[in-house]
Amino acid sequence: MKKVPYRLYLTEDQMPKVWYNLRADMPEQPDPLLNPATGKPATLEELEQVFCTELAKQELDGKTRYFEIPEPVQEIYKQYRPSPLIRAYNLEKALDTPAKIYYKFEGNNTCGSHKVNSAVAQAYYAKQQGLKGLTTETGAGQWGSALSEACAYFGLPLTVYMVKVSYEQKPYRKAVMQTFGAEVIPSPSNTTNAGRAILEKDPTTGGSLGCAISEAVEKAVSTPGYRYVLGSVLNQVLLHQSIIGQEARIAMDLLDEYPDVVIGCAGGGSNLGGLIGPYMRDKLTGKANPRIVAVEPASCPSLTRGKYAYDYCDTGRITPLARMYTLGCGFIPSANHAGGLRYHGMSPILSKLYHDGYMEAVSVEQTKVFEAATMFARLETILPAPESAHAIRAAIDEALRCKESGEKKTILFGLTGTGFFDMAAYTRFNEGNMQDYIPSDEELQRSFDTLPEVPGLKD
């Protein structure tokens, strides 16, 4: 039998020319975004005050199954796509498992992650609209790096509010953004009303994505000609990231393979939502029944310990309300959490799929994540981003269960990017200074107690 190659690259002609909208095949749509002032579904006109017009349209469209990828975006994609599908032969051998392990590697680009797939699209639509500039937030720095790169390409000014603890822990991510011309501000900051209010309550806070979103949105809506863009969570972002799953499906079809289990790390949901698209479609339409597994950090467990409720997407409570699995918009992960995936909520699409039983979720401690990352790096010669290593941990655990049971499963996971800017965290782990933190039920309850009340909402 012919051996499957280590790496399979599609040709340019095989690359997807459309984005896939998973909502078009969902039996029930995710609940709509709500205007916090009126409590009613947000309209296109209201979203246009925050987002580019075309992106606002994509955000609200649950019916159009495929969106054509604009030609200029396709051309930029060709500079780093298609990304390879890789068979983890060395990992399989080390685990002595009968399982076959594949991963879709998204790190072969300057920003080192999948985030650029949506960054290019969002910067393109902003340029087409004639905007003067953009604002955004970033946590670990991957999204900020990706959007900085995309904005430089299209000649758009960019202001990035970077979670303060990451700003301090990952100075080279900041340097990358600045090299591409972005202004980078540690969040919370004194440059916005939202930031000043957060600092007044806790001057020593390390910040959160929720804090940074508040500042970025405020900056956008108060600056003429500017709009805000987000790197995860939103429907539009999962749409753009669908190119990951579509490429994976084409490549696995060429190998006559189909995954029994699809695994992705989950913070806000961009990578996982992009990877699972065609396989979730099969599940929803009854063509196949793969297990879909979301892997999140134990220190920020929105799916596994959160509430399915309407909540603000930001700490300052100025964004529309989204129904999602959430820890509360005021939740701030422990400063010792080094593995990314720090957002308090999960994509409304993924939250709805999880709530309706179409996917599973597990949480893992960061020391176990870095154990998996180190093992993977030594065997597969790629240094993974800590975020990606959450999926690696779950894939290894699944492969070991196959070893115990003798099941010959096929496992596919997303390797979202590289860890070259995460060496401070790797150093802490290698020197034995990394600790796990799991929030108590009491801590989470204090955050749940602040969730907004939405009249008439049914579980």
Image (spheres, rainbow, N blue to C red):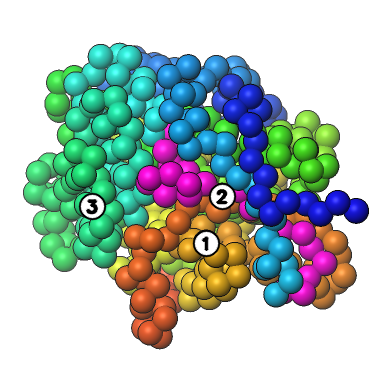
Magenta includes 331? Answer: no
Q: Most extreme residue toward the bottom, as rendered?
A: 432
Look at discs 3 and 2 and give the one toward the viewer. Answer: 2
The percent position of residue 314, horizontal first and vertical second, equals 31, 44
Q: State the residue in front, 137 or 300.
A: 137
Q: Is residue 225 above or below residue 320?
A: above
Q: Residue at x 48, y 49 (%)?
A: 107
The percent position of residue 168, horizontal first and vertical second, equals 21, 63
Residue underneath mark 2: 105
Q: Residue 191: in sight, yes or no?
A: yes
* Label 2 neighbour load within 10 Å: few <14, some 14-19, many 20+: many
Q: Most extreme residue toward the right, as rendered?
A: 1
Q: Is residue 238 left or right of residue 424?
A: right
Q: Earlier in the sequence, mark 1 or mark 2?
A: 2
Residue underneath mark 3: 174
Q: Label 3 to label 1, Cα distance in Å? A: 23 Å
Q: Helix or strand or loop: what does disc 2 sit on?
A: strand
Q: Label 3 to label 2, Cα distance in Å? A: 24 Å
- Amino acid, disc 2: Phe
Instruction: Classify the position of the C terminus by image quarter.
Output: top right
* Label 1 neighbour load within 10 Å: few <14, some 14-19, many 20+: some
Q: Earlier in the sequence, mark 3 or mark 2?
A: 2
- Amino acid, disc 1: Ile
Q: Earlier in the sequence, mark 3 or mark 1?
A: 3
Instruction: Write the start and end of the magenta stretch as one range.
Output: 95-118
Residue underneath mark 1: 382
Q: State the residue in front, 430 or 288.
A: 430
Q: Residue 325: in sight, yes or no?
A: no
Magenta includes 116? Answer: yes
